């Protein structure tokens, strides 16, 4: 199947965060606490947050957690094999709120899980940036940092190429060359994700 996908130039999208959240829920939250960043909970509309918190503490079985973890590990192996065979892997966490996977934060978690899957931090970042641009045929304008390209990027404290967890230390976001303060962006969506 992988050879056929590569031969036909079919890209696939990694959506690891939701499965990882399911594994964490079934295994039980550590100390009864949600496993998402506090900023994720803050961004959720109250009804979405309540649904997530209720979901996150539902009891699971060790057997179900083990089964889901095996499927997560298998997904990771297949994604590595696909890339090793020359396939174009994209990152898209499917941020619908289920399992605490929401836009932005879900993308960060996706990159962290790609590293957990065995990709280097630089490979994982490239999968989440350049590969999407390549798939869209826009790699000459977006996807990497270079003179003449659109200035859409994030500035982080730390070095995610060395420590992928530094992905969570976003200080400034640039969109179309305009800088946005991270705290102000988060404040602007506080309690609104999933609101209708």
Image: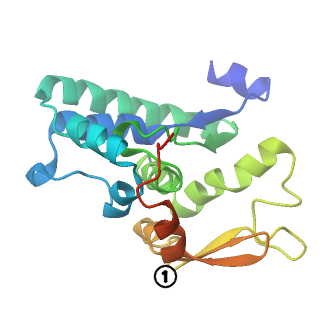
Query: In this rendering, would 50 be left or right of 136?
Result: left
Residue 76 location in percent, x, y?
45, 37
At a point 59% along the width and 59% down the height, the residue shown is 125
Residue to which mark 1 is pinned? 157
Residue ranking furthest to the left? 31
Q: Nearer the viewer, residue 70 or 138?
A: 138
Residue 69 location in percent, x, y?
28, 33
At a point 54% along the width and 36% down the height, the residue shown is 79
Q: State the SS at label 1.
A: loop
At a point 47% along the width and 81% down the height, the residue shown is 158
Asked which quadrant contains residue 67, the reply is: top left
Look at the picture and state if 189 lies above or below 161: above
At a point 12% along the width and 31% down the height, the residue shown is 59
Residue 49 location in percent, x, y?
32, 46
Q: Quadrant of the N terminus?
A: top right
Q: Nearer the viewer, residue 86 or 157?
A: 157
Query: In this rendering, would 7 be left or right of 81?
Result: right
Residue 36 location in percent, x, y?
31, 54
């Amino acid at each position: 199947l992988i050879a056929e996908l590569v031969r036909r130039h079919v890209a696939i999208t990694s959506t690891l965060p939701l499965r990882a959240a399911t594994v964490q829920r079934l295994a039980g939250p550590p100390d009864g606490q949600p496993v998402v960043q506090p900023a994720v909970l803050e961004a959720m509309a109250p009804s979405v947050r309540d649904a997530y918190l209720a979901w996150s503490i539902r009891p699971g079985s060790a057997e179900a957690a083990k089964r889901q973890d095996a499927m997560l590990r298998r997904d990771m192996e297949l994604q590595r094999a696909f890339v090793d065979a020359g396939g174009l892997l994209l990152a898209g966490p499917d941020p619908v709120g289920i399992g605490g996977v929401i836009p932005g934060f879900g993308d960060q978690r996706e990159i962290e899980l790609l590293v957990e899957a065995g990709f280097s931090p630089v490979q994982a970042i490239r999968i989440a940036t350049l590969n999407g641009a390549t798939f869209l045929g826009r790699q000459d304008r977006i996807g990497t940092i270079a003179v003449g390209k659109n200035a859409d990027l994030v500035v982080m404290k730390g070095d995610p190429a060395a420590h992928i967890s530094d992905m969570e230390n976003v200080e400034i976001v640039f969109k179309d060359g305009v800088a946005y303060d991270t705290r102000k962006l988060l404040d602007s969506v506080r309690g609104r994700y999933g609101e209708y």
